[in-house]
Image: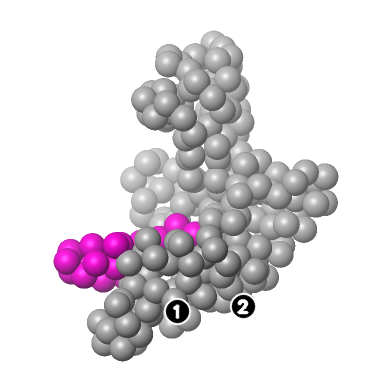
Amino acid sequence: MLAEQVGTLASLAEGRFILQCGLGYGEDQFAAMGTTMKTRPSAFEESLTALRRLWAGEDVSSSGRFTFTAASISPVPPEPVEIWIAASADVAIERAARMGDGWLAAPGEPKPGARHQVEQYRASCAALGKPAGVTAIRRDIFVGETSEEAARIAGPIVEKGYRGFPKDAPVYGSPAEVAEDFRELAAMGYTDVIVRSLVSDQSRALSSLRLLKEVRSMVADA
């Protein structure tokens, strides 16, 4: 089902299509699907291998954890689906290097951990004799007109323990300050930053999004 859903979406997209995936967490969520967290690694690797073959247009059979015979999908993606694998544990980062086209860092990872993990991902790729893929990280952000405005609006949200993140994981400030944070991530080795609004108020989120255009220009010009 997942292979065909992605194949359909990738066909509609008419261009680059990225699937972000990971092992998942939460014992109750796995129990609801009739499985346990203990089987995550083997199930993930087996399913990802089958997905790639199905997207390539092959007839695929499996007698492992998943059992099926001569399965195929339609439509087949017009170009290869990019797979970015989310990972933070050492063994999971190695898996992302081995099986993925890119790696996605955890959004709540503080700067020291983010630096260590991107280095580990690149080292894992090098050990496998393959170039490092996309190295992406999500940051929850708010861009204000000024530093003072950003601190007034986003500061209290972060101080209250936003989503349980360390205080240096969310990014907020003036366009220049946010751009500097993004440049720091680039210097660590990250190629992409995925953004999510730090604030829930729609008007403020839209204002931040408009100012993000300035941030993008500043980072591109650096």
Is-magenta flag for residue 200? yes
The quadrant in which the C terminus is found is bottom right
Q: Residue at x 52, y 69 (%)?
A: 182
Task: Please tell me whether mark 2 or mark 1 is closer to you in this view.
Answer: 1
Is-magenta flag for residue 56? no
Left or right: residue 5 compared with residue 76: left
Q: Give the residue type at disc 2.
A: Pro
Q: What stretch is highlighted in magenta?
A: 193-210
Say the numbered circle drawn on residue 105: none
Q: Position of residue 122 (x, y in %)?
A: 73, 57
Q: Name the residue under label 2.
A: 112
Left or right: residue 113 compared with residue 7: right
Q: Which of 59 and 65 is in front in this view?
A: 59
Residue sitting farthest toward the front: 221
Q: Give the residue type at disc 1.
A: Glu
The quadrant in which the N terminus is found is top left
Q: Mark 1 points at which residue?
A: 177
- Disc 1 element: helix
Q: Where is residue 120 in the image (x, y as percent from the top left)?
A: 71, 62
Of the numbered discs 2 and 1, the one sitting upstream in the chain is: 2
* Quadrant housing residue 174: bottom left
Q: Position of residue 134 (x, y in %)?
A: 61, 50
Q: Which of 66 and 170 is in front in this view?
A: 170
155 up-or-down from 62: above or below:
below
Rate crowding at label 1 as few (under 14), some (14 to 19) or many (20 or more) other CA atoms within 10 Å: some
163 up-or-down from 24: above or below:
below
Q: Which residue is drawn at 59% across and 56% down?
A: 191
In this rendering, does residue 97 appear at all? yes
